[in-house]
Image (cartoon, rainbow, N blue to C red):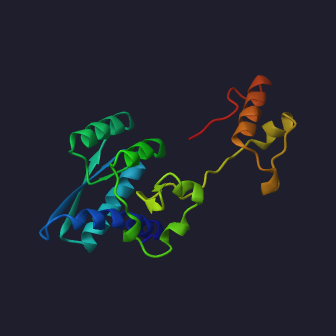
Amino acid sequence: MRRSLWMRIFLFLPFVLFAMQSLAAAKVELEWQVWGRPGEIRVFKEVIAEFERLNPDIQVNLSEYSWDDHHKTLDLRLAGGTSPDIYRTIYPYFGRYMKAGYAVDLTKYFPEGYWKRFWPSLLSFVEDNGKYYAVPQMTDTNVVFYNADVFRAAGLSAPTSIEEAWTWDDWERIGRAIKERGLLPYGIAGA
């Protein structure tokens, strides 16, 4: 099995274990509310299938919403007391949910040293008073590609060391300069 799938299972497992604590020993059903691109949803379903194979007494029901509807629905469900057992969210929303008591301290459900695996800046979004209320999903890095010919035409060269690395403000300045010089219709594009 792919290592990345096992990592996702490992990250997902503590949420399930926590939710199981307050439920009866009979067949347990959990709801996981998400949004996602087709590839993400496919991976979520693979994780669920593998988890259910390893835990036959637990059924995980995936509730899929569009990006536009996900947080509106989640906000209503949290406020109305009908929240899913597990939910996917982004950092700006999560801070609000955590402060409002819509997240549970997960710290004790993870092995010693687990939280040290994450960058401190990522953990700061899910931590409050030394307790962790979610697992950061984004544990990877962003990659930036640039067109070397356009950079040469603009008189730019890419940094060659971490000390020379550009900030997001630098990228904005560079993108605006490339567009203003007519080298490309858009100075920066993302996917």
Question: Would residue 63 be found to the left or right of residue 175 on screen?
Answer: left
Seen at 39% across and 49% down, the residue is 98
* Residue 10 screen position, x and y as percent: 40, 69
Question: Would residue 178 be found to the left or right of residue 144 on screen?
Answer: right
The C terminus appears in which quarter of the rendering?
Answer: top right
Seen at 47% across and 58% down, the residue is 129
How many labels sit on residues?
A: 0
Seen at 42% across and 70% down, the residue is 6
Q: Is residue 153 above or below residue 146?
A: above
Residue farthest toward the front in the current orientation of the protein: 129
Residue farthest toward the right in the current orientation of the protein: 155
* Residue 58 screen position, x and y as percent: 20, 66
Residue farthest toward the left in the current orientation of the protein: 26
Q: Is residue 122 above or below residue 83?
A: below
| Image quadrant where residue 19 sits | bottom left
The N terminus appears in which quarter of the rendering?
Answer: bottom left
Evaluate whether residue 89 shows in this view. Answer: no
Evaluate whether residue 139 shows in this view. Answer: yes
Question: Would residue 55 be found to the left or right of residue 160 on screen?
Answer: left
| Image quadrant where residue 43 sits | bottom left
Q: Nearer the viewer, residue 166 or 81?
A: 81
Question: Would residue 48 be found to the left or right of residue 27 on screen?
Answer: right
* Residue 63 screen position, x and y as percent: 26, 47
Seen at 13% across and 67% down, the residue is 24
